[in-house]
Amino acid sequence: MSFLNHLFHRHQQQPGIASSSSINWLGQSGTQYPYEIHPLDAQFQSVPANYIYAGQSEDGTWVPIYIAQTRALAQRLEGHVSIADATAQGATHIHVHLSTTGQGARCSEEHDLLERWHPVCNEAVEG
């Protein structure tokens, strides 16, 4: 029985790591946006997307550190907040929502999320 137990439980996630690879982020409007969760060092294609640098609180809930949109996810920051800045504020992952609906839709989603969450790194950029 221990072999079967080992076989079926060997892929358990480490404590502090999300058990799901996706999350729905709620905007101020009440709209839920689907995001895939990736490690900070993940490599991406140059595709349009919204993204969130996020960390987890002590109770395991995700906290947005920086919210943005880009036309080329591979170059996501385009001179705003660096991964080092986001990490210094507690970011451990990048959440990504690929978007082919145009820049207007990406900007609208970004604004909706910013209005609800007010992430620390966005406040630093705006201030």
Image (spheres, rainbow, N blue to C red):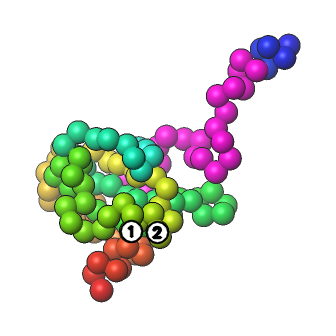
Q: CA distance from mark 1 to mark 2?
A: 5 Å
Residue 20 x/y as whole percent: 54, 41
Q: Which residue is mark 1?
A: 85
Q: Which residue is mark 2?
A: 88
- The quarter holding residue 42 reads top left
Residue 123 x/y as whole percent: 35, 79
Picture quarter with the N terminus: top right
Kindly tell me whether residue 106 is visible in this rendering.
no
Residue 92 sits above or below residue 124 on the image: above
Chain part drawn in magenta: 6-34
Picture quarter with the C terminus: bottom left
Query: In the shown orientation, is residue 16 left or right of residue 21?
Result: right
Residue 48 x/y as whole percent: 19, 48
Please say whether residue 105 is one of the residues in the magenta stretch.
Answer: no
Residue lying at the far bottom in this picture: please name it: 127
- Which residue is drawn at the image coordinates 43% and 56% (left, top)? 25
Q: Which mark is residue 125?
A: none
- Which residue is drawn at the image coordinates 64% and 51% (left, top)? 16
Badge 1 vs badge 2, beta-carbon distance below 8 Å = yes
- The quarter holding residue 113 reads bottom left
> How many other residues sit within 10 Å of disc 1, few (<14), some (14-19) or many (≥20)?
some
Residue 44 sits above or below residue 83 on the image: above
- Which residue is drawn at the image coordinates 45% and 63% (left, top)? 87
